[in-house]
Amino acid sequence: MPEHERRGKKSVQCLPEVLPAVNKAWWAAIERIVSFARTTLELVGLAALAAGLCLYLFRERLLYNPSVETESVYKAYVVPVIRQGDEFNEINLEALKKNDPEIFRKLIVEFVGKRNLGASIQATVRFFDDLIECHESLFCRIDNYGQFEEPILDFWYTFSPVILDSRGAAEPADFGKAIQAEAGRILTEYREDGRIHPLGDNVRR
């Protein structure tokens, strides 16, 4: 048999031996890829779990939480101002039913002046602005923030003319912007939920 035929025959005979080796190499490569992907997913899952745990511990244990002090200041200084607002609404209920912004403005400005409430209102605005800022911050928390939502609503929509007048005069131009935005959000939720405040919308402008 010629030499070139012997070489060709030998090559053909080697194919059955080569193919299993190639298949094993492919399967080994695929197994390595699958193993790598599985390990990666496990590591990602563990990282997500660790991140969630750290976030929980961070929020529960490490964040600034002035809830106790906030509650104390609220009861001592803010509640009396809220009650003054309630008294104003009760005294002027019939006039407020006319839903006239000019009448409302005139009445509340006179009321605040007679009761000398200007400084107390300014302090209450700062209290609520700080409260809202803490609530919206990633690094601060207030327990039971919901209990302050109705007082925020009532305070802003009762004393807003006085607060707005102080902007750019006695106070910065952004004075009370946080409570203004939050009161608007709360009022929108009230309306969407079908909730009606006992005083209605007479001073909800």
Image (cartoon, grey):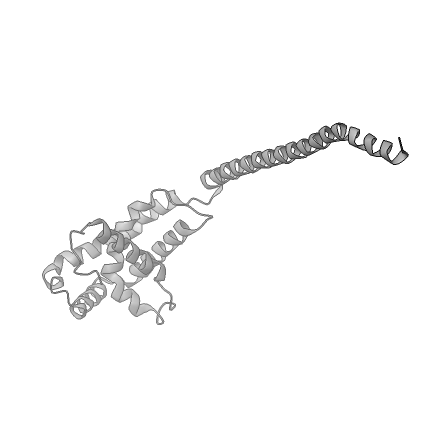
Residue at image x 38%, y 66%?
A: 174
Is residue 3 shown left or right of residue 62? right
Q: Position of residue 128 (x, y in %)?
A: 34, 54
Between 5 and 124, the one lying in front of the other is 5
Residue at image x 26%, y 56%?
A: 155
Is residue 127 shown left or right of residue 39? left
Looking at this view, name the residue that lies furthest to the front: 1
Residue at image x 34%, y 46%?
A: 145
Between 119 and 196, the one lying in front of the other is 196
Q: Relative to 181, is 164 above or below?
A: below
Q: Locate residue 72: give its quadrant.
A: top left
Q: Quadrant of the N terminus?
A: top right
Q: Position of residue 29 (x, y in %)?
A: 68, 34
> Is residue 81 at least partly visible in the picture?
no
Is residue 24 shown left or right of residue 195? right
Between 26 and 141, the one lying in front of the other is 26
Q: Position of residue 13 (x, y in %)?
A: 79, 28
Q: Quadrant of the C terminus?
A: bottom left
Looking at this view, name the residue that lies furthest to the left: 94
Q: Locate residue 164: give its quadrant.
A: bottom left
Q: Locate residue 167: give its quadrant.
A: bottom left
Q: Position of residue 88 (x, y in %)?
A: 17, 59
